[in-house]
Image (cartoon, helix red, strand yellow):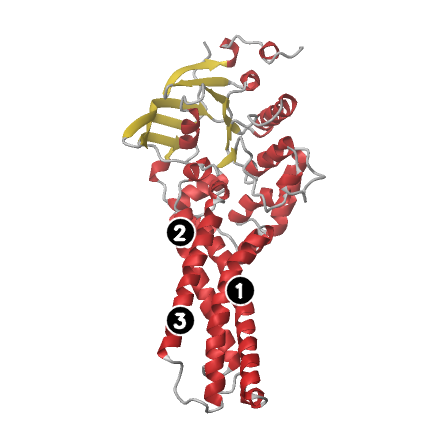
């Protein structure tokens, strides 16, 4: 019987996507600020990776990213996760009523989690796309001012499929950004989905 | 008085108890309520604020879990349902209307109305047709694309009524549906609910303060201090609604 019910209650992905996108649009500036956190962290990551790719390709230094630099990158990513979790918690709290309503209309816990994770991964995607492109461009320009024209000839996009390809760096950074955003949103989304509808709707903000 | 009512019970509660913890003190919001509601009835739950009527309403709607006792919807004990079955019941069996409308603010009227149908797996075109039909039924056929914030309170509540009816529920639960509305709009909503009750044989259960509600109810359940005070038939209640509201007849 339970399997039947599961099949009868569902939220198609396209609908979930539409709802998530609309929720972001209506809280546009809030979404932008959350996105900025991701953008900055990812831009930093991308610039560090790009700089190392260029120096490696130009054979200026032979070793990979120095440990200290890696440490700074990891720290900035941690700050980014905390920031995302914080803003997702806010976003979830102010929408308890909406969550309660959705559950009254027959939404499963899973739908609520799905909607919030979608929302945050969309934020993560656009934020880190902008961040990785900006970080890469900036670092290329900085290196260009130091090393001159040969920097451009050293740039590869998908030639080796390694961390020394600019294209791969951007893809990697976007993946990291989306991953972190989802990670930061899991806890608030899960908490929200577990609420009894009556409790969720009683909350007054 | 009348012969025994043989209609099946749509809602039945047995010794319903709900306790809340307020700090270290436990507060009994409901202390053993037994009620039977028949299919097709129009029921008002009356009581002063803090009497436990909203708690009772949440219990019979499956929106909150009782501390003790049972709630039966169509003879099924809802405590036995798992999450899927409970969601299914909220989706298909029960339509909810709230005092504060609780429409999803980012969605237009038609999207709000079609959302429960999407959850229920109704194909998009069919859901849109049905949604339009329902919005026309509540008199909002020309406002289907409006967002909740672009509508008046009465219009929002009518959208909520249409949404409650989306999956042809057997029961409509209304928590103070006229609480945020002015007199005339409140009357329109009540008339609308009564019409649905008559035409579609939907069981309507409404927690309310509103004496206008009594006039259209089959029975009135009075709750006080978490206990069932009395159940009255409409004809036993001796009030003249017009006078109570201070309105010329």
Instruction: Find numbered disc 3 in the image and state the secondary structure of the residue it sits on.
Output: helix
Q: Nearer the viewer, mark 3 or mark 1?
A: 3
Seen at 46% across and 37% down, the residue is A201
Mark 1 sits on what residue? A127
Q: Please say whether residue A19 is visible from this viewpoint.
A: no
Task: Look at the numbered discs 3 and 1 and tell me whether their residues touch, using CB distance below 8 Å.
Answer: no
Mark 1 surroundings: few (<14), some (14-19) or many (≥20) residues within 10 A: many
Q: Is residue A36 left or right of residue A76?
A: right
CA distance separating discs 1 and 2: 23 Å
> As drawn, which residue projects farthest toward the front?
A146
Mark 3 sits on what residue? A72
Mark 2 surroundings: few (<14), some (14-19) or many (≥20) residues within 10 A: some
Whole-percent x, y for residue A33 in the image: 54, 57
Instruction: Find numbered disc 2 in the image and state the secondary structure of the residue it sits on.
Output: helix
Task: Name the chain letter of the residue that bears numbered label 2.
Answer: A
Whole-percent x, y for residue A145 in the image: 57, 83
Q: Nearer the viewer, mark 1 or mark 2?
A: 1
């Amino acid at each position: 019987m339970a399997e039947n019910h599961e099949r009868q209650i569902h939220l198609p992905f396209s609908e979930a996507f539409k709802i998530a996108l609309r929720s972001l649009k209506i809280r546009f500036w809030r979404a932008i600020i959350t996105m900025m956190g991701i953008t900055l962290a990812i831009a930093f990551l991308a610039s560090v990776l790009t700089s190392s790719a260029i120096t490696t390709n130009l054979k200026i230094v032979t070793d990979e990213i120095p440990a200290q630099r890696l440490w700074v990158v990891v720290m900035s990513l941690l700050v980014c996760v905390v920031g995302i979790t914080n803003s997702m918690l806010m976003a979830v709290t102010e929408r308890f009523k909406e969550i309660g309503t959705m559950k009254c209309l027959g939404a499963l816990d899973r739908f609520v989690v799905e909607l919030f994770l979608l929302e945050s991964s969309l934020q993560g995607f656009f934020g880190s796309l902008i961040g990785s492109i900006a970080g890469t461009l900036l670092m290329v320009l900085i290196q260009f001012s130091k090393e001159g024209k040969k920097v451009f000839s050293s740039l590869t996009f998908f030639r080796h499929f390694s961390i020394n390809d600019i294209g791969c760096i951007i893809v990697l950074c976007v993946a990291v950004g989306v991953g972190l955003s989802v990670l930061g949103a899991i806890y608030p989304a899960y908490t929200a989905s577990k609420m009894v509808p009556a409790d969720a709707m009683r909350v007054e903000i | 008085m009348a012969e025994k009512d043989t209609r099946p019970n749509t809602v039945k509660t047995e010794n319903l108890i709900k306790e809340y913890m307020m700090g270290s003190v436990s507060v009994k919001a409901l202390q053993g309520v037994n009620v039977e509601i028949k299919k097709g009835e129009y029921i008002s739950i009356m009581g002063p604020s803090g009497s436990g009527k909203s708690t009772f309403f949440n219990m019979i709607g499956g929106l909150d879990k009782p501390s003790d006792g049972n709630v039966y919807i169509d003879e099924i004990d809802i405590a036995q349902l798992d999450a899927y079955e409970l969601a299914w019941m909220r989706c298909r069996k029960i339509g909810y209307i709230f005092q504060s409308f609780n429409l999803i603010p980012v969605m237009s009227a038609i999207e709000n109305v079609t959302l429960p149908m999407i959850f229920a797996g109704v194909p998009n075109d069919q859901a849109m047709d049905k949604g339009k039909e329902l919005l026309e039924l509540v008199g909002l056929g020309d406002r289907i694309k409006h967002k909740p914030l672009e509508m008046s309170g009465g219009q929002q509540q009518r959208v909520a009524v249409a949404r409650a009816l989306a999956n042809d529920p057997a029961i409509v639960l209304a928590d103070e549906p006229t609480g945020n509305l002015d007199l005339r709009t409140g009357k329109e909503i009540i008339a609308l609910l009564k019409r649905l009750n008559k035409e579609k044989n939907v069981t309507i259960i409404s927690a309310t303060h509103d004496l206008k509600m009594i006039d259209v109810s089959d029975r009135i359940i009075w709750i006080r201090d978490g206990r069932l005070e009395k159940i009255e038939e409409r004809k036993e209640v001796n009030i003249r609604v017009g006078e109570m509201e201070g309105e010329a007849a």
